[in-house]
Amino acid sequence: QVQLVESGGGLVQAGGSLRLSCAYSGRTFSSYSMGWFRQAPGKEREFVAAIAWSGVKIYYADSVKGRFTISRDNAKNTVYLQMNSLKPEDTAVYYCAAEAYRGVGWDLPLKPDYWGQGTQVTVSS
């Protein structure tokens, strides 16, 4: 059974930074492609960033490109989302997601098999 637990959310002023962490437990972490999604009040859940099981392919939503960085540490079974230059429109619940290995040619869209419970990020103006 795979479990994902996010942490690192909170309240920050515009222009500030936060680092989200997602701790993975279960089967071999290194075989899972990982991603972050977010959902603002009254809006649909949207893709933020993803990193392939190999760590070679990384993708970002246009809205966060250049400000957010996704990374993974397979030794710690953890994926991170470093968020810089935060804006009020980044306010949302951020969810970690995991997609099981389906072959060497992984690409977007990330198709999550597992989700975390979410962590709130609030950016004040």
Image (tube, helix red, strand yellow):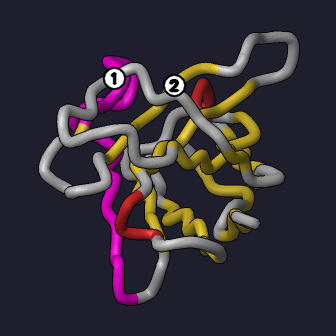
Kind of element beneath mark 1: loop
Residue toward you, 58 or 82: 58
Q: Quadrant of the N terminus?
A: bottom right
Residue toward you, 67 or 74: 74
The answer to if 60 sits in the magenta stretch is: yes
- Part of the protein shown in magenta: 59-75
Assess disc 1: are there few (<14), some (14-19) or many (≥20) residues with their C-alpha within 10 Å of its C-alpha: few
Assess disc 2: are there few (<14), some (14-19) or many (≥20) residues with their C-alpha within 10 Å of its C-alpha: many
Q: Residue at x 50, y 47 (%)?
A: 100
Instruction: State whether residue 67 is above or below residue 13.
Output: above
Tag 2 and tag 1, C-beta contact below 8 Å? yes
User: Which label sits on residue 108?
Assistant: 1
Q: Residue at x 37, y 30 (%)?
A: 64
Q: Amino acid at mark 1?
A: Leu
Q: Is residue 99 left or right of residue 89?
A: left
Q: Residue at x 31, y 61 (%)?
A: 71
Q: Residue at x 51, y 43 (%)?
A: 99
Q: Position of residue 83 (x, y in %)?
A: 43, 52
Q: CA distance from mark 2 to mark 1?
A: 10 Å
Q: Earlier in the sequence, mark 2 or mark 1?
A: 2
Q: Is residue 68 left or right of residue 11?
A: left
User: Which label sits on residue 47?
Assistant: 2
Q: Is residue 4 left or right of residue 21?
A: right
Instruction: State whether residue 111 is above or below residue 25.
Output: above
Residue sticking out furthest to the left: 56
Q: Quadrant of the C terminus?
A: top right
Instruction: State whether residue 15 is above or below residue 21.
Output: above
Residue sticking out furthest to the front: 103
Q: In the image, which is nearer the foreground, mark 2 or mark 1?
A: 1
Kind of element beneath mark 2: strand
